């Protein structure tokens, strides 16, 4: 397994992140435990979850599944860099969502109980809270850290200027601030390259891409259709996205075939080549899906392949001008 530091910290994490959103709603507890065991067998130590995961069968269910896995012992918790999130509603009453000091305190304690642990390695804000001042947020996070309940703080779905505002507010309090940002980032959605990635690199914030396969569209969906296999990318908004980019996806799958790689592996490998990316989140529903994702760690993309991927999925550049972070300059 290849490891890297999380942002500017000294914390070593695997370059693939095990996402657990499917644990409970899509993946049985038995298979979820098997996937986590297999992750450790292959050296993956970075697990990501959230308090709202499991919402289809019950909010908090995913954390509970992980907690019961930790409870089986054998050093499972000690070998895991555990990341969870708060923000989404966990109930119908006021102050059961967002980032007030009250909800930060309550949400953290509730996650600790479900996860059956006494500390969270990386506590992430699942979304920006536009109504709570940074002074309140950082004070609440500082209290949790002083109590030993969290070690690091991260964000998710923040804009570049949100990262800057958060870091400058943390600096005023002589705090480390954010060490990671989870962003929607894949070959189809490269908007974070304009401001989020440059801001993250400037502040030493590690970027953790979510949805690296674009909801399955980059996972070989056309090949699966030809083979008669079902795919979630053939229905709903994924189907609309596929229809919009069908010619590009056809060419992309051909490129993967020419390279002798699975399209999903190619998409993950491309992210691993991007400056500032700590590691993409893989969200396997089955042990077999987990095994196939590991191949991305072995793939090295040459300049010709990277250039071809840029041709198929051009980086965003307003006015068709300079690349990020100077895309808005003239």
Image (cartoon, rainbow, N blue to C red):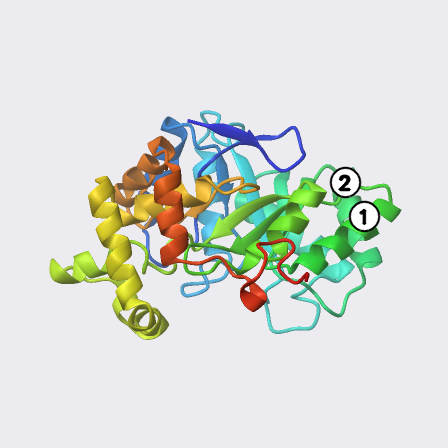
Q: Residue at x 84, y 45 (%)?
A: 171
**Residue 14, percent across and down?**
48, 33
Q: Is residue 284 above or below residue 25?
A: above
In the displayed structure, does residue 128 sit left or right of residue 312? right
Image position of 151 (left or right of 212):
right
Residue at (37, 59) in percent of width and height: 25
Q: Residue 196 in the image: x percent, y percent?
A: 62, 54
Disc 2: which residue:
176
Give the residue drawn at x 45%, y 52%: 62
Q: Is residue 312 left or right of residue 161?
A: left
Q: Is the N terminus in the top left, top right, bottom left or bottom right quadrant? A: top left
x and y percentages locating residue 317 in the rendered image: 55, 62
Specify whether 153 is left or right of 287.
right
Which of 267/328 is in front? Answer: 328
Q: Secondary structure at mark 1?
A: helix
Question: Are circles 1 and 2 on residues that touch, CB within 8 Å?
Answer: yes
Residue corresponding to mark 1? 170
């Amino acid at each position: 397994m290849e490891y890297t530091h999380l942002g500017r910290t000294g914390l070593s994490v695997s370059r693939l992140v095990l996402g657990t959103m499917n644990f409970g709603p899509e993946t049985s507890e038995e298979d979820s435990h098997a996937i986590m065991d297999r992750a450790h067998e292959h050296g993956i130590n970075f697990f990501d979850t959230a308090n709202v995961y499991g919402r289809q069968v019950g909010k908090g269910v995913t954390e509970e599944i992980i907690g019961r896995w930790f409870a089986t012992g054998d050093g499972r918790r000690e070998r895991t860099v555990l990341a969870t999130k708060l923000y989404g509603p966990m109930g119908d009453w006021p102050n059961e969502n967002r980032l007030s000091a009250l909800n930060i305190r309550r949400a953290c304690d509730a996650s600790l109980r479900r996860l059956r642990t006494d500390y969270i390695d990386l506590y992430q804000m699942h979304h920006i809270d536009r109504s709570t001042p940074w002074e309140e947020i950082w004070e609440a996070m500082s209290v949790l850290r002083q109590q030993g309940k969290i070690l690091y703080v991260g964000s998710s779905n923040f804009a570049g200027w949100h990262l800057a505002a958060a870091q400058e507010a943390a600096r005023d309090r002589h705090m480390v601030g954010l060490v990671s940002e989870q962003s929607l980032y894949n070959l189809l959605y490269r908007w974070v390259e304009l401001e989020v990635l440059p801001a993250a690199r400037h502040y030493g914030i590690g970027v953790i891409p979510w949805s690296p396969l674009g909801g399955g569209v980059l996972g070989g969906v056309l090949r699966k259709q030809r083979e008669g296999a079902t795919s979630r990318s053939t229905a709903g908004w994924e189907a609309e996205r596929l229809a919009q980019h069908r010619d590009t996806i056809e060419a992309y799958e051909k490129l993967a075939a020419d390279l002798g790689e699975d399209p999903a592996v190619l998409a993950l490998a491309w992210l691993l080549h991007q400056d500032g990316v700590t590691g993409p989140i893989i969200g396997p529903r089955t042990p077999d899906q987990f095994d196939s994702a590991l191949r991305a760690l072995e793939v090295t993309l040459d300049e010709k392949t990277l250039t071809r991927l840029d041709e198929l999925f051009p980086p965003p550049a307003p006015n068709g001008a300079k690349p990020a972070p100077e895309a808005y300059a003239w």
